[in-house]
């Protein structure tokens, strides 16, 4: 039996990125704590980019050395993504 660490355990969250079988559609599944984690990471990168810095943040499953993404696929006919890299580029200053 496979252990499912994100189901029913306090302090854990659900966050997955999954590709359609065709690879042309991305679905993000998350419970409130998982979506807050994603929002905080994106907000941090946006703040860096607004200040003129670039930045990279990675979200990974435990098999890829992280703990941000869940290992259990939530969609049907999807492929789980084990690591997501978000790259922030400095914002353009408007004149």
Image (cartoon, rainbow, N blue to C red):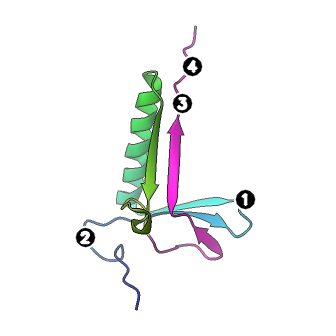
Give the class, few, some or many, for how many residues have Cα within 10 Å of label 2's Cα (few <14, many ≥20). Answer: few
Residue identifier under label 2: 10
Q: Nearer the viewer, mark 1 or mark 3?
A: 3
- SS of the residue at dot 4? loop
Residue farthest to the left, as pictured: 10
| Residue found at x 43% / y 69% | 63
The Cα–Cα distance between marks 2 and 1, rounded to whole angstroms, is 34 Å
**Residue 40, image x and y in percent?**
37, 44
Q: Earlier in the sequence, mark 1 or mark 3?
A: 1
Q: Position of residue 6 (x, y in %)?
A: 36, 73
The residue tagged 4 is 92
Asked if disc 2 and disc 3 are in contact, CB closer than 8 Å, the reply is: no
**Residue 5 in picture, x, y percent from top left:** 34, 75
> Quick check: 94 left or right of 11?
right
Residue for badge 1: 24
| Magenta extent | 71-95
For the residues labelled 4 and 3, the Cα–Cα distance comes to: 9 Å
Q: Nearer the viewer, residue 85 or 26?
A: 85
Q: Which residue is mark 3?
A: 89
């Amino acid at each position: 039996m496979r252990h499912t660490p994100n189901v029913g355990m306090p302090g854990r969250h659900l966050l997955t990125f999954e590709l359609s079988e065709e690879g042309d559609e991305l679905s993000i599944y998350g419970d409130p704590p998982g979506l807050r984690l994603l929002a905080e990471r994106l907000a941090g990168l946006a703040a860096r980019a607004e200040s003129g810095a670039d930045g990279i943040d990675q979200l990974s499953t435990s098999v890829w050395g992280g703990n941000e993404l869940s290992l259990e696929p939530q969609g049907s006919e999807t492929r789980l993504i084990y690591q997501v890299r978000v790259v922030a580029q400095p914002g353009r200053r408007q004149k």
